[in-house]
Amino acid sequence: MRSHSRWGALPAAFRITLLSVGALIMIVPFLYMVSTSFKTSTYVFTNPPEFIPSPATTANYEQAFATENFGRFFLNSLIVASISTAISLLVSSMMAYAFARFTFRGKEAIFRVMLLGLMIPAIMLIIPQFILAKNLHLLDSLAGLVLFYVAGSLSLNTFLLRGFFESIPAELDQAMQVDGAGAWRRYWRLALPLAKPGLATATIFTFLACWDEFTLALTLTNSPENQTLPIAIKLFAGSGNNAVQWGLVFAASVIAVVPVIIVFLVFQRYFVQGLTSGAVKG
Amino acid sequence: MKRSRTIAITALAASVAMLATGCATADSGGGSAGDPVTITFWGAYGNGGNSAQQDVLNDTLIPAFEAAHPDIKVTYVDVPYDDLLKKLTTSAAGDELPDLVRADLGWVPKFADLGVLVPLSQAMPDFQELADATFPGVLSTNLWKGEYYGLPLDTNTRVLITSQAALDAAGLDAPPATFDDLEKAASALNGTGISLFADGGLGAWNISPWIWSGGGAITDDEMTTATGYLDGTKSVATVQMLVDLYKTGQISNGITGNAGAISTAEGLPNNTYATIFDGPWMTGIWADQFPDFAPIYAPIPAGDGGSVSVVGGEDIVLTATSKHQEAAMEFIRYTQSDDFQLALVPTGQLTVIKALGDKQVELVPFLKVFTDQLATAKARLAIPQGSQVDTILNEELVPAFEGTVSVKDALSKAATRIDELLAEQ
Amino acid sequence: MTLTTLGESLGADVAGHVSAASVPPARPRRRRSSTGGGLVPYLFLAPGATLFALTVLYPTVQAFQMSFFDWKLVASASKFIGFDNYLRALQDDHFWLALSNSGIYMVFTVVPQIVIGLAIALLLKRKSPTQPLFRVLFYLPVVTSWVVVSLLFRFLFSDAGLINFTLGDFLHLTDGSTPWLADRWTALLAICALGVWKGIGWSMMIFLAALQGVPAALLEAAAMDGANRWQRFRAVTVPAIWPALLFVTVMLVIGGFNVFVSVYLMTGGGPAGRTEVLLTYMYKQAFENLDFGYGSAIAVLLTVIVFILSVVQLRVFRDRNGEGAL
């Protein structure tokens, strides 16, 4: 099916140019960061800015990897982010399905309360959440982090997925109902597969949020066995103003960015597989 | 699809497993009597990748202590400096403080006021002996309502730093030693593109050396009032001098809070600034980044009050919830020992023990200026709301530097606001 | 109504998922299925709702409680003071300044992120070999930590930084020595620039996903009817991505008011507190002055403002949506 024609005559060259300029603005600061990560112990930036480090060195990366427990931090972040994302998707898609497909007492009220979760500044909850974690014996544990991360992502994911579920036509549900399919089957066999773009988006966002989360991790964990990557990066940054080993901080940041990019690349494929795939099968 | 269900179940199982592990780890830490006691010690020795201090602590000092005290084990936890206060606050609220903390000077009154610290002057029989050995300026930061809640651990101070290039441009043979020298240097530097002085703000850490050296004061000796002292004639005259220099461009606008100004750490080596105030830690940093730069250290320029600087550093405190107070106090005693103090000197931590001043200079000669300065250095206001004082000073003084308010009015307003804080004691 | 055609064509497309015999004949459709399922929806809600109530709502209530006390870390020493903290906030000049800064930031980051994010998503919609590459590039800022980019942008906008270099020495638009972070308005501009730069990729991703659901058949039909690109956009695309637009707007408004790390690290609220935003002000009260009661009160006020704004947005969006429902 030809889809180019509906765009009229927007020349490809114009499109590419616009996009390239935009992309350039997006990545220039990032490029600078990467290039600084290959520079020898700079704590200050040179002017005019050098994009090609000379001499270039991998010393920062070596130091980052050689830092005690760095590998452990990385692994902890990986475990916590992956498990939190999986659980969060399951739980919030269930909730989103309930909001999208059913009417029931208190529906909009409950939804508004969930929305409230988005608006509360997380930083204000730190002390009560710390005390709660302590009472649940979840201090200094990865499980504690998973619990709070999942909880923290519920509002966003439910809100997001509700929108996606709602845009699936209702008669598809009704068709399956007529077939005798119960709510769970409809959810599992129909809604989830059709909401793949939404699920993929939610996966990327949740993974990223858990991966980058710092404040709760710092508050709830003490021992290196349970700490996560953002803490390591902040430890490298020392006290923000003076004597920051920027090369080291940026090297650690670049290392930290890699898994998220991988998750992004893997899951973004699912955007494309959305409804259009149905057209091909039909 | 079967596969997705398997994934979901695995995820669930994994999380249950994690929960179980979590519970298990949380329970460990209590031992029966007779086992070595473990005390936890939080600090920011890690210094962001400049791990020299932390290495000395973990590789030399703690093993030495544990060898001398086989029944005590010390676990050091490194926390990013900027976040240490926050973590302490949260942990205090949740009753999960460690045994010992390397606390910034300004935090001791705060936490003492909250009742989470042990008054060492009462708990340690040998306290007076230990206290007398330390510099009075640093010791005073532990005093709160008549009791001492910690002992000095390490200290630092600010001195004047300049460079040969700057001295040449200003036509000076030696670093400016008095306020008059500064003003002469300022006129000589006019037109050279070099500013006489730069600093990062107008808080107590920044402005106190000036006010004290000028013969003024922030408050009276008993810390009951600031009015009449902060806005006294000498204080006003000193700040006026700074404002005049600022207006002629001889002080960079970093002092009024321009976060984008060239930092003092950079501006001195690359000849944007002629002089700055800073501490002993800069030497290692400059050696790394500007290997050709040779800083010249000198005392704070003297005004009518002599050459007086401000005391910085950390104290060691014992938390009231510690279950191993005796063991922790042993470690505190160890930190006051020559071994401990001198081991950290080469890494940039000045000793708090008066008698070790000479040894310190022997180990690291350039520390002479700092050691001498420490003899007369004073502490900032040791009240729980110390950070509010900085905010007040910044907010009231910036308009004075910008010229919208007179120096006297600005200082009076600041003094009134500080009076309110002092009244809360 | 053309949107009914949408339902039919889609029904046919996805017929492979359900047995052909059971596709119901065309009849009036409602957007939401009105299956009141008794206990079932509550079962679906249970795990999430319980978790949410325990770890988010309960702490929120506790934090709310704190705002009525002169709260000391050691809870027993806290004193009940009723609404004093709230009254103090309303009379506090710093509070109002922080509120206005948060509002300004919100407006000047939300609008660009939506407009530019949507524009980029539209440009990127077509499948082409360069599409994945561009997607990654635009998403990179989103993926980098706030701490790192805030410090990076602080450098970029510093007196001797890349921005001044570009504007002055490179493009010759200014004299290259603007002290961006020394003045409230230029500093806010720099902070907003960071906010927009960091967030565009995020809204782009959502719009990209939503644009997948715009029915191609409908666009073709409209084109054949003679509608130009803008009309097709308004009549077909916008209604189809309405839920996404709502979602993005609500999220960005909330995020805008909750700005913290970038301000904290770029200017620290300075100079002299002129770029303070609500959360940096709250943070200082709570964690530097250890005045949790007051900090909580500020946080509650912020939450109320954001809540009202969100409800208004939902109302407005849902009403407009009602007109165009299936």
Image: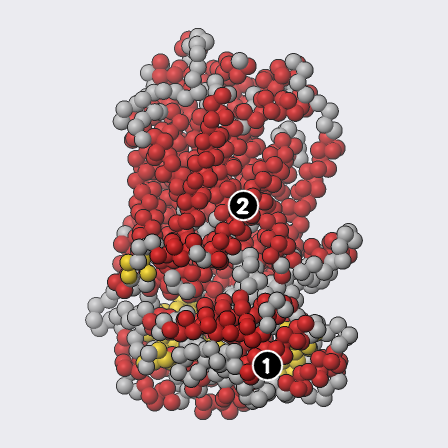
Coloring applied to the structure: secondary structure
| CA gap, disc 2 and disc 1 | 44 Å
Mark 2, residue position? C106
Q: Is residue C113 left or right of residue B141?
A: right
Place residue B243 in its image quadrant: bottom right
> Residue at point 46% right, 35% down?
C312
Q: Is residue A160 at least partly visible in the picture?
A: no
Residue C72 visible (yes or no): yes
Residue at left offset 63%, top offset 16%: C222
Q: Where does the image place residue C323, in percent across and percent down from the top left?
A: 49, 21
Quadrant placement of the N terminus of chain A: top right
Q: Nearer the viewer, residue A275 or B142?
A: B142
Tell whether B109 sits left or right of C186. Answer: left
Instruction: Say which chain tag 1 marks.
Output: B
Q: Residues within 10 Å of mark 2 (few under 14, many from 20)?
A: many
Q: Do circles 2 and 1 both sit on a common chain?
A: no
